[in-house]
Each structure stands twice: as C-alpha cells, then as structure tokens.
Image: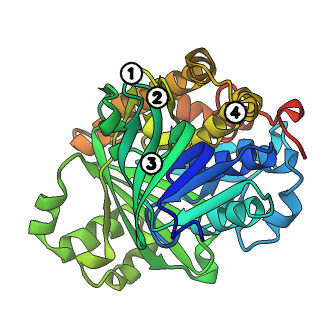
Amino acid sequence: MSEQEASRIEVECCIAGGGPAGMMLGFLLARAGVDVLVLEKHGDFLRDFRGDTIHPSTLEVIGELGLLEAFLARPHQEVRELRAQIGNMDGPVADFTHLPTRCKFLVLMPQWDFLDFLAEKARGYPTFRLMMEAEVTGLRREAATGRVIGVTARTRDGVVDVASDLVVDAEGRHSSLRDMAGFTVIELGAPMDVLWFRISRRPDDGGYTFGHADRGGMLVTINRGDYWQCALIIAKGSFPAMQARGLDAFRKDVARLAPPLGDRTDEVRGWDDVKLLSVALDRAARWHQAGILLIGDAAHAMTPIGGVGINLAIQDAVAAANILAEKLRQRTVTAADLALVQERRDFPTRATQTMQRVIQERVISKVLAGEGPVEPPALVRLIYRWPILRRIPAHLVGIGFRPEHVEAAAYRA
C-alpha cells in the first residue's frame, strides 16, 4: 500500500509546512537517520513574490553540508552591495565582500528553486518522505496527558492519521496548526504593508538591488535578471484607499520614487499584477508544548526589512536538528529538549525584531507619514561617507545574530 493510500502513518518526526524551515529541517533530520515526514498543503512550491534572498549565513550552512557547488550551479544572481536612495542622497549602505564566510554575497533565487533543491537532496535519504497536497486539519493528543502525538491531514486521497513522536509546526506566519494548539502570539506591530509587482529590466539599468525612499513612500527594486522585482511599501491597511485612487496614481507613485522606471510603469496592467503582503511582526510567547515545536515564521514573523525572515527560519531548522536529531533517533525527546531550541534561538529572534522595530519607528513610519522633507538618518550619512562602516549592516543582514552551524556529531553523513 502506498503512503498516500494509507490511512495511518507512523514517523519519528512530522513537519507541517514545506517552506524553508520545514524543508531544511526535514533534510537535516533525514540526513541524521530520523524517520521524517513533511506535509505541504500545496501541490507545488510555485508561489511568486516569496522571500527570494539567500543570505551568506544560509550559504554557509549549505557549504557545511557539501552542497554549495551544486546549489550555485542553479540559475541565480549574486549581490555584493546594497544601495539606498533616501531623499536626494544615495549610495552604498552594505558591503558583503568582507564577511568571514564562504560566500561574500547574497544570492537571489526564486524560493521554489531553493525548495526544489532541498527536496531533491532530501529524497536521497531513505528516511525522508514529502507529501504534497496534504493539509493538516487537526492535532492528535494523548487523552491522559494532553501530549501531542500526531496530526490528521487531508490529502487528495482522503484523510491520513499521522502518529509522531514530535510534530514541528513550520506552517508560517498564518499557521492554523499554531492556532489549533493554542499558542499565545505577542503582536509587536508593523506600520506598513508591501505591494509586490514586476517591471522589465534593461541592460543599461544597472545591476544593484536598490532602496528608494522619499516623502510618503518607499520602493525596493531587486535585480532578477530580465526584470525588477519591486516592493512598494505603503502604510498599514492603506491598499484599499490606493485602489480607490486608481492604477494611474499607483504608477505615478512608482515613477516618482524610481524615475528611471517611469516609462515602464504601464507594464502593471491591472491590480491582478499587484500582490499584497500584509506585514506582521510577532512572536510566540512559548514555542513548544509536549510533543510539538514551532520554528520559522510560525514562531516569529519578521517584516521584510533586510529580507532576513527566510534565513532566520533556516537557522531555526539547523538549531532544532542539532539539538533534537539524536534524541529523535533514540525516541527520547523531552519538553526540556524542545525548550533548548527556543532558548538557543530566542536571543537572535528578539535582537532582530528589536532592530526592525527601531528602523520602523525612526525611518519607515516617518517616511510613510510624509511629514517634511526626507533626509537620511545620521548613521546612514556616515555609512555613505565611510566605506568601512558598510560592513556593519552587511554583517547584520548577511550573518545576523548568533548564526548556526551544522554540528557533525548530530548527523550520519
């Protein structure tokens, strides 16, 4: 009987969500000899305007796994410098070429290619299983203790009961599993939403990933080869009002922030070409209960500032695998073991969110309010002037706080 025909599956670890955190953890646990099942509710990974930046900290992990050459053989762009235009000043703000890592650059790669890569490598291990079109619909708990002992999932072939020593929730910021389990989420607030869209790129446009900020608006343009992936940052909840103003007003806003793209804004033909990301900044007060652990955006949603969300999710997965792999093989995972994962990842989560809140309050909120002329903060002006200071934001974005490394002792290569 195939796994999709089966009404019951038993594994050592069941991971809900096939995003970056779930797929990386599934790969690492399978590599360690853990019997692991990843449930992904969609039929494929093809969802546009997702986090496409792979930072040096993640590339370091891929290198430690011996997969860097194969990974970089896939189509991608490399970013060694970030630039920002704030008001009437512009210049480099982050220089990745001095980082103490294998790769001194960001990689831009569609998230579906990254996830396909992880899935392909994970399938090389006999203890890895991935079920697509499998949506978690309920938790299974032990009657006497309330401990989570598995999930139920709806698949195209019917309902499946999964019995598992550990359930990992990697479903993301809108996790239904987190809600089912009753985790408390602390809302930290975000003053903005993001509108994603595409505009064609010409050979003479230049190759920089660029941030543009001026009174009342912010725009990020990401070089994706033959097009710019654009992110227009707007005030939280203001998208309906923007739609009411009309598409021409939207195009004028884009052209004002990035004049070189002004003659191409009509490539956005309708609102269907614009995707709204409702930005959230939050974290679960506690990431674990008996039998269940949250990682990635399910544990802590990040804003798009710095594009660091995917990389924090990967770091969570590495920490969880380092701490839990041997215990899962021995089937001896305890609540204390799960608490160690949160303890390990709590500081980088809080530090990153604090940094994002400061940027929100001191820069983004003021720009979006449109009050007075926009000028770079004093620190940014110093970064413009002194190249050595560009290493600081590069380290914060590219490596972050407390980067994780693959611990050889936890794995069976």
User: From what the image shows, is residue 118 above or below residue 226?
Assistant: above
> Dot 3, crowdedness within 10 Å: few (<14), some or many (≥20)?
many
> Dot 2, crowdedness within 10 Å: few (<14), some or many (≥20)?
many
Kindly identify which residue carries mark 2: 353
Quadrant in the picture for residue 263:
bottom left
Cα separation, mark 2 vs mark 3, equals 20 Å
Dot in front, 1 or 2: 1
**Residue 234 position within the rendered picture, expressed as x and y whole percent measured from the top left:** 27, 52
Cα separation, mark 3 vs mark 4, equals 21 Å
Q: Amino acid at mark 4?
A: Leu
Q: What numbered label is drawn on residue 13?
A: none
Q: What numbered label is drawn on residue 144?
A: 1
Cα separation, mark 1 vs mark 3, equals 27 Å
Kindly identify which residue carries mark 4: 328
Which one is earlier in the sequence, the residue at label 3 or at label 4? 3
User: From what the image shows, is residue 122 above or below residue 158?
Assistant: above
> Dot 4, crowdedness within 10 Å: few (<14), some or many (≥20)?
many
Which one is earlier in the sequence, the residue at label 4 or at label 1? 1
Which one is earlier in the sequence, the residue at label 1 or at label 3? 1
